[in-house]
Structures are given as structure tokens and as C-alpha cells.
Amino acid sequence: MVITPRGKQEEVMALPAKGHIVVLGTAGSGKTTIALLRAHHLANIPNGGKVLLVTFNGALVEYMRGVSSSRSTKLVVENYHKFARGYLYSRGKMPSWNGILGPEEKAYYIKQAVELLKINYPKESTFNRPKEFFIEEITFIEKFGFANLVEYSEAERIGRASSNIKRENRKWIFAVYEKYIELREAAGRKYDWDDMAFYVFNELQDDVGERRYTHIIVDEGQDFSPMMIKSLVEAVADGGSFTFFGDVAQQIYGSRLSWRDSGVNANKIWRFNVNYRNPATITTFAKAVTQNEYWRQDGDMVEATAQIAEGPKPILVKFSDKKREVAWVVERAIATGKTASTVIICRNRTDIDTLLLALKNKGCAAIEINKDTPGFAHLKKLYITTYHSAKGLEFDNVFIPYLTEEKFPDPDIVSGAVSNEDAYADEIKLLYVAATRSKYGLYMTYSGALSPLFPEDSDSYDFHDEEEVI
């Protein structure tokens, strides 16, 4: 697949191969495209050194590899955790067995840490907070790389419910963090997925050897933690370049990252506000999503000022029950998938399995997109994936089922959050991401009561009852 730069994309592609560059863009502005183009450009500079193109999403890595026309051995495309594990292994700091704690094990050891401290300090009310509170706060400590209580106590958490923690109580939370690390290491687990970047950064600071990469490019940078970005900046060879591409409107992993907090020193910010992917009808709907009461605004957000593509108005269809909803989505998606790239975007594994079975019963073998899926999305086929794996991809037609209040926001996410407001703020960005994957048609469905995260502005979409579409 040949990628052709448009407008400012060509200028950014060929920016100097030295220093820090920040590119912020709206959905559909071609950030992933220009990240690929810049990677190829840097990889083809004579004697220019190796290039790392890194993203958070494993499915997006496979997409990039699939559409890439470069065969340069100087270009490496991988997700952050593969980079981190590889570097720690090269330094003899990655156990041959799995030394990384998964989310469930992490939750277990944090709970154990709280219980042990509660025994020692029975009158301290901080330890009566729910387990989920400590998990989120410890993850915050890890993602920002606070090395001691002073750093953590002085940190501000703007826009999160836990920002109201009294400073005098933070010592107890940090004590839980330290006890968690102690318990984890006693069990032979050196890292969890959220603090690997902290150890990579520290190891790089002590590493006086030659850096492997001269140039590092980060795509979908808004999903990286500050420590991930800091470690990648540190991994660039002297005289090399670091390029950050991001869109705060699509920040779906909860880090609330500002690139300014992450060691990036750019003299100029490039802003891409032309939407090449979405027609005006879809950008109007996406803007309506951002006007929901649960959306949290950010000063770095870039709004589209122009749209190149054209397409119909998004539609929302209400069904009397889930069975009818699934039947319509399957029938319509199969039909559009015969002539254009089409995707059904789901919230979780259970919903994917339900739809895959319904598709199979209709004789359709949809392609599931995940970190193991090879190059795709520019083919006239039917795909199915999750909100998170759809990140950075584009399709002619997008179907988003199950937009009911009992499924969206995800009740498991809400129950595990520090506050409903925090959960809603994270969940609503998933709808924004899913909707802006479409280059033409956007079909949304629900049965029962509509999700409170869905925009009330009916002018941004057409509403239909099932009788009108069946």
C-alpha cells in the first residue's frame, strides 16, 4: 500500500532529524500516516542510524507493518512493552521466567499491603478506602515515576476525583505502595506492566553504552504514561531525534498525560486540524460527544477546522430487544462488508463472541482485529474488534452496537473506579474513538435505555426505530 503525504504532512515528514518535535492533531488528520512517513524518511537517510516507531496498541503495530512499504532493516515497529522488555533483557534485568505482574496479581498484592498496614495502624481511616482506590493511586505513582514521598506529596492530580486526597494522608498511600513493592519482590516479581517504564528510565540513565536508536517516533502518544515518554526520550542517541504524535481527545488509558510533563522539549508545536478521514457529518457528531457533561476538556485538544471527505449523517437505531439489534447489525454489516471495509466495534470480549457467533450462523467469517492480526483495514472485508484495538485504524463503515446504559459505560469499570465521574470521563472517550474510525458510514444501535454518555444533540445524527430499518 503506497502512502502519499498531503498538505502539512509532507513538511512534517521531512523536519530536521535532530531534537524534539511535537505534532498534535484531531482524529482523522493523518497522524499515523505521517508517523509512518517520517519513520521511512529517517530510515532512508544515508548513515542515519536505526529508527524505532513505537505505539501503545498491539493491533496498531500490526496495521503499521501491514501498510508499510519500507523493507528497511533500519526501521523497527513495535509496542512500548516489547521495547521495554527487550531493553531490560539486554541489560540482564529481565528474568528468564515471567517476572511481570498481571493486573489481577497486582490487585492481590496491593490488597495484602493494605491489610498488613491496617493491622499496624488500626486507627488510620485511610486504610478503609476501597481496594480500587489504592490500585488507581499506586498506578498513578508508577506512571509518573515518583521515587519518594516528597515527590508524590507535591504532585497535583488535576481533573481526577483522587485530586482531593489531603496531603497529610498521602504518606499512608505511599506506605501501601512501598509495602506492595516489598511483597511483590518477595514473590519474585520485579515489575508490573505500569512501572516497567520507571525501571527502563532508571536503567537508561545508568547506561553509558551506545544507544540502539538514533530516532524514536511515538504514535498515539496520548496513551503513554509520562514515564514511558521519559524513557523513550532517554533512549534516543545523542544528536538524534524524538517525534511525538498525539491527540488528547483520544486519550483512553487514563494517564492524563501532558507531553510537557514527560521530558519533551519542543520549540514549536505542529497542529494538524484538517480531517482527511471523517466527513463533516461525523466530525459534527464527534464534537457533540465532546460537549457531553462528562467530557473533560484539555488545552492541547485540536478541533478540526476543515473536512475533506463527504458522507451521510450517522444513524442511531433503537431496537425492542438485543436479539433484534444483533440480527440487524449482522445483516447490515455483512452487506456493507462486501463492497467496503467495515468494522463492528465492541466494548468487551463477551460482545465480540456474541456477534462472531451470529455472523458465523449467517455464513460470514469476520476477521477479528487484535495484536496478532496481520496487515488489514484497507481491504473490502468485514472486521470486528474492541474500542481499544480500533485505536488509530480507519474503515469505510463503522457499526457500534450496545449503546445502552446497562453496557456503556461498562458497569465493571464504573464499580472499580474511584468515582463515577472518573469512569465516565474515561469511557466517553471510547465512543469518540470508535465513531471517528469511519470514513463514510456510522451506524449505532441500542435496546432499552440509551447510554447517558451518548450526545443528546439529535441534530448530529438521525434517529430511527427498528420498524423504520427492518
Image (cartoon, helix red, strand yellow):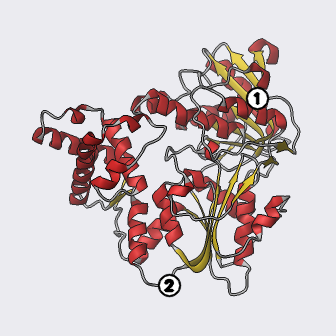
Relative placement, left or right, of 429 versus 88 is right
Which mark sits nearer the N-terminus, 2 or 1? 2
Which image quarter is the N terminus in? bottom right
Residue 215 spot, x, y in % from top left: 62, 74
Instruction: Residue 150: tell me if it is visible.
Output: yes
Q: Is residue 185 above or below residue 276?
A: below
What amino acid type is highlighted by mark number 2?
Glu
Q: Residues within 10 Å of mark 2 (few under 14, many from 20)?
A: few
The image's mark for residue 249 is none
Reading the image, the residue beneath label 1 is 331
- Please give the name of the residue rendered at 53% of the width and 21% of the height, measured from the top-left corner: 406
What amino acid type is highlighted by mark number 1?
Glu
Relative placement, left or right, of 39 versus 372 is right
- Relative to the observer, which residue lies in front, 298 or 90? 298
Instruction: Residue 194: tell me if it is visible.
Output: no
- Relative to the observer, which residue lies in front, 241 or 210? 241
- Relative to the observer, which residue lies in front, 267 or 405? 267
Residue 3 spot, x, y in % from top left: 81, 62
Label 2 SS? loop
- Please give the name of the residue rendered at 54% of the width and 79% of the height, measured from the top-left corner: 212
Relative placement, left or right, of 456 versus 277 is left
Reading the image, the residue beneath label 2 is 210
Residue 324 spot, x, y in % from top left: 68, 19
Which image quarter is the C terminus in? top right
- Relative to the observer, which residue lies in front, 465 or 308? 308
User: Which tag is nearer the camera, tag 2 or tag 1?
Assistant: 2
Classify residue 202 by image quadrant: bottom left
Q: Is residue 28 above or below residue 399?
A: below
- Please give the name of the residue rendered at 75% of the width and 19% of the height, measured from the top-left corner: 458
Cα–Cα gap, marks 2 and 1: 56 Å
